[in-house]
Amino acid sequence: KAGVTQTPRYLIKTRGQQVTLSCSPISGHRSVSWYQQTPGQGLQFLFEYFSETQRNKGNFPGRFSGRQFSNSRSEMNVSTLELGDSALYLCASSTGTSGRETQYFGPGTRLLVL
Amino acid sequence: GESVGLHLPTLSVQEGDNSIINCAYSNSASDYFIWYKQESGKGPQFIIDIRSNMDKRQGQRVTVLLNKTVKHLSLQIAATQPGDSAVYFCAENRGHGQNFVFGPGTRLSVLP
């Protein structure tokens, strides 16, 4: 079974631009969660989508948004990029049925904001 | 590239020895815990999990211990190998869906 895939793997943007990252979960998984990983803050939860609905949300500003499609693929968008948005963005998928299950991570998208 | 922080706690062990990585969690309501391994340039990889109704769980070469009284989690790796070198994270689920809170991580360095 294929794992979680994320595209693109690397991205360079400038301040003020916006970016869209994509995540394809493991086949059969309906929950997709997004995390931001930085050296200073570690791994922080952004949001979770299940059946095309946002089910949980972390403490990030509204510039960070996401969506999920009917095939469970998910995208996250960051608008008006700031230097501090430079990070590794990870998505994780799970079956999502019980709400507390093992999450499997993708390789991440490394975003650099200049 | 670097996957995690520059100033992580580091545990250095000799190849073949056992490793113990510790994690303190903060919320007594947390009822599900996962240990992840993250190698440079990769996403976290699931190692083992444990629910709060258990205090010990064993996998292949790994054991997780949960002490709810002091809110402490540990990961024991038997016969540590060079391929075990990575950053290890504990993650707790506080009962609000798939919102996991991750610890700061520990870098395990295996010496030949």
Image (cartoon, helix red, strand yellow):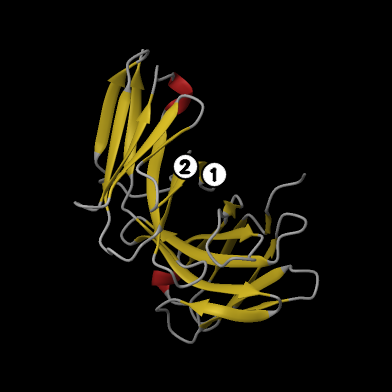
Disc 1 versus disc 2: nearer the observer:
2
Q: Residue furthest bottom?
A: A62
Circle 2 residue: B38
| Chain holding disc 2 | B
Asked which quadrant contains residue A28, the reply is bottom right
The x, y position of residue B43, in whole percent, is: 54, 48
Q: Residue furthest left?
A: B70
At label 1, counting other C-alpha atoms closer than 10 Å, the crowd grade (few under 14, some 14-19, many 20 or more) is some
Q: Secondary structure at mark 2?
A: strand
Residue positioned 59% across, 65% down in the render? A98
The x, y position of residue A84, in whole percent, is: 39, 70
* Horizontal side of residue B78 vs B23, given as left or right: right
- Please tell me whether residue B102 is drawn above or below residue B17 in the rendered image: below
Q: Tell me the distance, in whole angstroms, between the alpha carbons under discs 1 and 2.
A: 6 Å
Asked if the residue at tag 2 contacts the one at tag 1, i.e. Cβ–Cβ closer than 8 Å, the answer is yes
Q: Are marks 1 and 2 on the same chain?
A: yes
At label 2, counting other C-alpha atoms closer than 10 Å, the crowd grade (few under 14, some 14-19, many 20 or more) is many
| Chain holding disc 1 | B
Can residue B41 be spotted in the picture? Answer: no
Residue positioned 71% across, 60% down in the render? A29
- Please tell me whether residue B44 is drawn above or below residue A46 in the rendered image: above
* Horizontal side of residue B19 vs B69, given as left or right: right
Asked which quadrant contains residue B82, the reply is top left
Circle 1 residue: B42
